[in-house]
C-alpha cells in the first residue's frame, strides 16, 4: 500500500492511498479537486473512495467534483452525515470497514471537531 501526500490550497494536504494488490484507490480529506485529479491522471489511477476525517471545508472542498468525475463513494462519520457533502457511507465509532485487502477500524476522536474520526489501517 502506498500513501502519497498531495499539496492542496496554500498549506494543506490530501493523501492518496493506493492498494497495489487490489487496485483500490482513495483520497483522504481533499480540500480541492484539481491537484488530486492531476495526480490521478498522471498515475493513470481511478478514484474509488473519498475519506473524510471531519467536515471542515479544507478537508471536504473537493468531495462533490471528485465524486461526480470518478463515481467515488464518500465516507465519513455518521454523526457528520449532514455536514459532509455527498456522503454515501456513514460509519460509526469502532466499526470495521474494508478498503481493498485492508481492514480499517474507524475511531471517533472528537477534539478538533465533535465528529472527527480516524481511519486506522
Image (cartoon, rainbow, N blue to C red):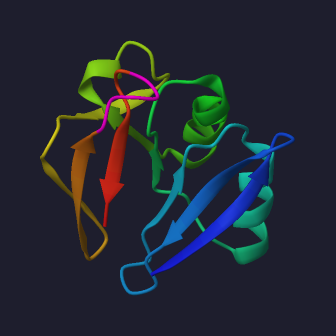
Residue that extends furthest to the bottom in the rendered view of this protein: 21
Residue that extends furthest to the top in the rendered view of this protein: 82
* Rendering coords of residue 28 (x, y %): 52, 51
Q: Quadrant of the N terminus?
A: bottom left
Q: Nearer the viewer, residue 114 or 32?
A: 114
**Above or below 5: residue 71:** above
> What residue is rendered at 46% in x and 29% in y?
112
Q: Is residue 98 left or right of 7 when viewed as pictured?
A: left
Q: Quadrant of the C terminus?
A: bottom left
**Above or below 23: residue 77:** above
> For residue 88, what is the image quadrant?
top left
> For residue 110, what is the image quadrant?
top left
* Rendering coords of residue 77 (x, y %): 30, 31
Q: Nearer the viewer, residue 69 or 104?
A: 104
Magenta part mainly helix, strand or loop?
A: loop
* Rendering coords of residue 100 (x, y %): 31, 71
**Above or below 21: residue 73:** above
> What residue is rendered at 34% in x and 39% in y?
117
Residue that extends furthest to the right in the rendered view of this protein: 10
Is residue 8 inside the magenta stretch? Answer: no
Amino acid at each position: 500500500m502506498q500513501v502519497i501526500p498531495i499539496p492542496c490550497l496554500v498549506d494543506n494536504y490530501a493523501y492518496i492511498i493506493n492498494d497495489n494488490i487490489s487496485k483500490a484507490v482513495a483520497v483522504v480529506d481533499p480540500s480541492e479537486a484539481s491537484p488530486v485529479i492531476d495526480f490521478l491522471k498522471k498515475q493513470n489511477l481511478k478514484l474509488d473512495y473519498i475519506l473524510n476525517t471531519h467536515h471542515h471545508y479544507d478537508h471536504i472542498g473537493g468531495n462533490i467534483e471528485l465524486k461526480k468525475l470518478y463515481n467515488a463513494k464518500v465516507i465519513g462519520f455518521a454523526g457528520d452525515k449532514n455536514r459532509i457533502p455527498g456522503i454515501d457511507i456513514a460509519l460509526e465509532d469502532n466499526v470495521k470497514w474494508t478498503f481493498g485487502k485492508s481492514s480499517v477500524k474507524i475511531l471517533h476522536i472528537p477534539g478538533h471537531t465533535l465528529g472527527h474520526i480516524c481511519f486506522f489501517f
